[in-house]
Image: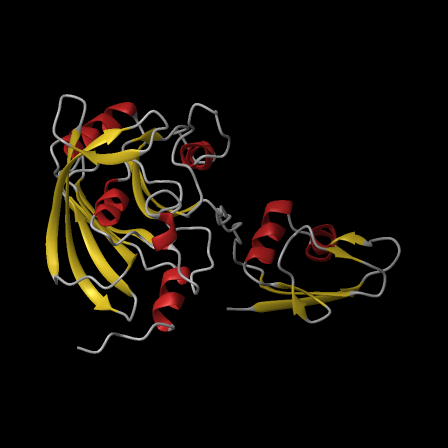
Amino acid sequence: MAMTSLSTTVDADNAGRVDLVARQLTESSRSQVRGMVGHGCVSINGVICPSIARTVVVGDVVSICFDSHQRYKEKKKHWDDRTFSVVFEDNYLIVTDKSAGTLTVPTDHNELNTLVDRVSLYLSHSRGNREAWVVHRLDRSVSGLLVFGKQEQVANQLIEQFRHRKPKRVYTAIVSGVMANDEGTFRSHLATGKNLDRYVAPPSSETELAITHYRVLQRMTDTTLVEVTLETGKRNQIRIHFADAGYPVLADPRYRTKQAKHPRWIRARIALHAKSLCFQHPNSGEVMTFESPLPTAMTKFLAGSRSKSK
């Protein structure tokens, strides 16, 4: 590989954007220079240039080291979005890792920049698909894995799987108090009040059956780390079940709020994370499993907690 090294000192005639200086120096096209910058071939005063938009002033030294026989293609820009990250994507669906504090879909208040909006915007920058179709949801203050369909038919097929309780959804939660049983199941009917709060109620035509399985992972002095598996996926199901049992999710602003407070939990989010999602691909039939690491807020809290002695 024959490398070519070129260098120039910026004067009053070529001060400005570094890509324009690089084009003059290498006699290359704009796209080729973009590729060189992306591959770290361009330096300003000995420091690799991070962007083609970087400006240079009189006296700056622009250096370029490149293979004159190579076609430098511009690197695809990394999508930077605080509301989500992409875990998996193909022509049919997209699996995202949602940040806490982000609504999945707008409410009656028509909020902007919800997760479905942001994912749809992301898809609009790719070829062909321009809209995300909602399959399931996470509460605003909960982080973790969500799948969207790229076409309505795909979303409907996934929704049908959820309706028949086929996908496996596993959460991690830190709850207030020390749970006595190593594992168990909450099974109750949930009703919705006028203020949209959910609560446990006797079975009726207006209630929904909710089933939550849990397993204790670690007991601390005043909190418990649990793994939660949903058999049904009703709104606020996990939060209601643990609060009703006397162990509200840490920092829950709605259910047993006083008990849910903890002096070392200073985040606005609650300590609940959708860590695992498993479903059957609607086109190939392949069983797909995705994992999301525990958020920093939860790992830091656990690191600072003392395990309860047996």
Viewer-nearest residue: 138 or 166 = 138
What residue is at 62 percent from the left and 59 percent from the top? 50
Q: Position of residue 244 (x, y in %)?
A: 22, 46
Point out residue 120 in the picture as x, y percentages from the top left corner: 42, 32
In this view, the residue farthest toward the bottom is 309
- Looking at the picture, the colour scheme in use is secondary structure
Seen at 67% across and 69% down, the residue is: 47
The answer, for residue 92, to whether it is visible in the render is no
Could you tell whether 105 is left or right of 275 in the image? Answer: right
Q: Residue at x 22, y 68 (%)?
A: 218
Quarter where residue 235 is shown = top left
Does the rendering let one see residue 268? yes
Q: Pick the residue in front: 48 or 300.
A: 300
Q: Residue furthest front?
A: 258
User: Residue lying furthest right in this view?
Assistant: 12
Of 305 and 286, nearer the camera is 305
Q: Position of residue 285 (x, y in %)?
A: 13, 38
Residue 90 position within the rendered picture, expressed as x and y whole percent measured from the top left:
30, 40
Total count of labels: 0
Quadrant where the C terminus sits is bottom left
- Residue at figure coordinates x 17%, y 30% from the top left: 208
Residue 305 higher or lower than 164, as above or below = below
Quadrant in the rendering for residue 202:
top left
Q: Is residue 85 left or right of residue 68?
A: left
- Tell me which corner region of the image, top left, top right, bottom left or bottom right, holds residue 264: bottom left
In the image: residue 157, left or right of residue 136: left
